[in-house]
Image: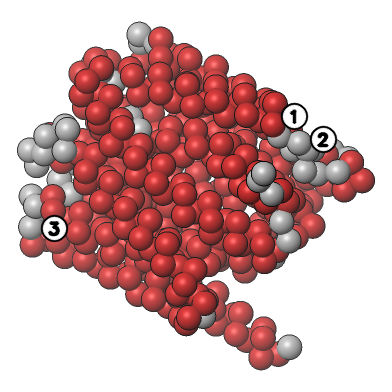
Amino acid sequence: MFNKETKYLFLIISIFIAACIETDIFLPAMTDMMIYFSVGEDMIQSLLTWNFVGICISCPLYGPLSDAFGRKRPLLIALGLFLVGSILTTTATGFNMMLFGRVLQGLGSGGCFTLGTAIIFDSFQEEKAILAINRINSIVPFIMAGAPMLGGYLNYTFGFRSNFVAIAIVVMGSLSTSLFLFKETLPENARKPFNMRKVASDFKTLSLSIPFWQAILVVCLTFAGYLAFLSTVSVLYVIELGVSKDSIPAFQAALLGTWLIANLACGRAIAKWGAGTVKKTGTALFTAGGVGLLTAAWAAPKDPYLLTGAMTFYSFGANWINSTYFPEGMSLFPDIKGTAASFLTSARLLIAALVVGLASTLYDGSIYPIALIVFTISAVNFLIICMYESRKNEGLAEA
């Protein structure tokens, strides 16, 4: 028999899995989709941008609604929207309908991330919640690493539409699991009446917290740079650098595999050296990746192996930064976990949408724009981390 913690981990993974693959699985098919829908690079990348817009619209509501009505009902609504959007993407013959389906997927996907995070902090005490997040983070990268490889195979064998059929099947499985196996984690006596004034007040509290902003910006910017690189090279490597379509998933999987290795090593590194050392090491590697990508873009702009190699440093460091600052940011406001999860998820995807949109706008058929974006993100994150840790140390000294 599985214990309670294992059951909840299984549930949360089943909630996350569809949201994790819907971004990466179709990236190897972007060039084929450009041909089918007769659109350019900027338009095809809008499938990512508008998906994030859908997430950002919905995320601020899922947390407060789940704090008022429990986690299960909002979760089922989210997965229902996700399923409708997924069905539309499997049948769309025009680009606008495909885009609308991606928005609906985003409206549902936002609930998966937000409510899954809130369920973790409902089900586990703070220390166990962090451990649970780390366990999930050790499994999710396997899924994410496999998504582009599966997407590349499906696209090569059955065409781009099969990627969206796969998403629909996974969402159906997530919905069935949540409907029949999920028991509410937020008891009625812990719920708070839904009050728009209170919701606005909670969001104001979060938005005015400098430590919270610093912690989540590190997470948000890391994710944005990572995703912007993946979305750009999906087109750049094939059209400009001559990489075959069936080889693209291998380059994406290299970055995700590095993330996985970093995640598996993170817990042991924290136990052996402490969270402070892990933060410093992650920051150093993250920054080295940004500098390395800019250097590689200048020295060998047509070498996909060198460019991807530089990003592996970024990927490893980003994992260690996310694994430490994400739970730290969530723990700053334990009384409004749902709202904090909504805020963090919405901010992460909004920033990602803006950065991916900027990357697509600046795209000129070369690696230079995305290299400059990743380098800038690395530099900004370095400064934010320095300010955050300095402020934190001053607070500890005063205490």
Label 2, label 3: how far apart the Cα atoms are:
51 Å
Category of crowding for the residue at label 2, using alpha-carbon neighbours closer than 10 angstroms: few (below 14), some (14–19), many (at least 20): some
Residue at left offset 14%, top offset 61%: 296
Q: Which residue is mark 2?
A: 69
Gap between marks 2 and 1 measured at Cα? 7 Å
What amino acid is at disc 1?
Answer: Arg
Label 1 belongs to which residue?
A: 73
Q: Is residue 117 visible?
A: no
Dot 3: few (<14), some (14–19), or many (≥20) neighbours within 10 Å? Answer: some
Compared across the picture, whether 303 is left or right of 396 comes to: left
Please give the name of the residue rendered at 31% of the width and 37% of the height, measured from the top-left corner: 148
* Residue 306 badge: 3
State if disc 1 and disc 2 touch (CB < 8 Å): yes
The total of numbered circles placed on residues is 3
Element class at badge 2: helix
In the rendered structure, are the residues bearing label 2 and label 3 in contact, judged by CB atoms less than 8 Å apart? no
Mark closer to the chain start, 2 or 3: 2
Q: Quick one: 121 or 30, which is closer to the camera? A: 121
Secondary structure found at label 3: helix
Residue found farthest to the right: 189
| x 58%, y 36%: residue | 15
Describe the element under mark 1 as helix, strand or loop.
helix
Which amino acid, mark 2? Phe
